[in-house]
Image: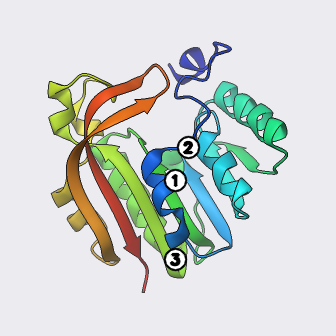
Amino acid sequence: MWDERYSSEIYAYGKSPNNFLEENFRWIPKGRVLSLAEGEGRNAVFLAKQGYSVTAVDASQVGLSKGKRLADENGVEVEWIHADLSDFDLGENQWDGIISIFCPLPSAERKKLHRKAITGLRGKGIFLLEAYTPEQLKHGTGGGKSADTMISKESLIGELSELRFIHLLELERNIVEGIYHTGLGAVVQLIALKT
C-alpha cells in the first residue's frame, strides 16, 4: 500500500515537517535521532537541517528513495533504513531522540515498538509523538479507517509508563500535510523523557 501511495511525483504528506515536531524539536538533545515510519523524508530532513544526526526507518523503499531525493535537495545527510518496524532492532541506549509522527501500526505491534523505544533511548533522551486518536474516525481527514491503529492518551500512559511525561494532550487541530492529512484532526501529542 505504501509503495503505491508514494509512487506519485507529488509528496503525499508534503515536504514540510509536521507542525508539532517543528514547534517542539528543541526538547530533543542534540545528537542521534531515530524517525519511525518516516515515509518520504519530510521530518528526517527537517531534523537534519537543525543539526541532528538522523536515521529514518520505513517499510516503503519508494518512500525512502523520495526521502533521499528531498535530503539531496536540502543538502543534508540522513541514514535511510528499509525495514519493517515489527522486527526492527532499535538497540539499547542509542538514541537521544525518537520521533513517531502518524505511525499507524496495529496496537499489538505498536506496544512492542514502544517497549523497544524505551530501551533504545539514552538517559535524558526524548520520545516525541503525534498520532490520530480513535475520535479521528468521525473526521475522516486522514489516518485510515481502523481504530486499532490509532492511539489514545490512556494507551500511551500504559505503554510508556517508564518515561516521564513532559507533555501529553489529546486535542483537535487543523492539519494540512499534503493530500492525505488535510482538515480537522483528532490527535494525541506526547513529549516524554527517559530519566
On screen, residue 125 above or below 130: below
Task: From this view, report whether residue 144 is shown above or below residue 107.
Answer: above
The residue under label 2 is 17
Q: Is residue 180 left or right of residue 31?
A: left
Residue at 58%, 38% (x, y): give it. 16
Q: Nearer the viewer, mark 1 or mark 3?
A: 1
Q: Which residue is mark 1?
A: 22
Q: Real-space Cα distance between discs 1 and 3?
A: 18 Å
Which corner quadrant of the image does residue 127 belong to?
A: bottom left
In the picture, measured across the screen, residue 187 lies left or right of residue 92, that is left
Q: Position of residue 64 (x, y in %)?
A: 69, 34
x, y percent for residue 67: 71, 35
**What secondary structure is marked by label 3?**
strand
Out of 75 and 122, give the one closest to the viewer. Answer: 75
Reply above or below: 172 against 180.
below
The amino acid marked with disc number 1 is Glu
Q: Is residue 17 left or right of residue 71?
A: left
- In the rendered structure, which disc, 1 or 3, sits on the residue that comes first in sequence? 1
Q: Kindly indicate the quadrant of the structure image that contains residue 5.
A: top right
Of labels 2 and 3, earlier in sequence is: 2
Which residue in the structure is indicated by mark 3?
Answer: 125
Tell me if I can see residue 88 in this picture. Answer: no
Q: What type is the residue that disc 3 sits on?
A: Gly
Pointer 1 with pointer 2, Cβ within 8 A: yes
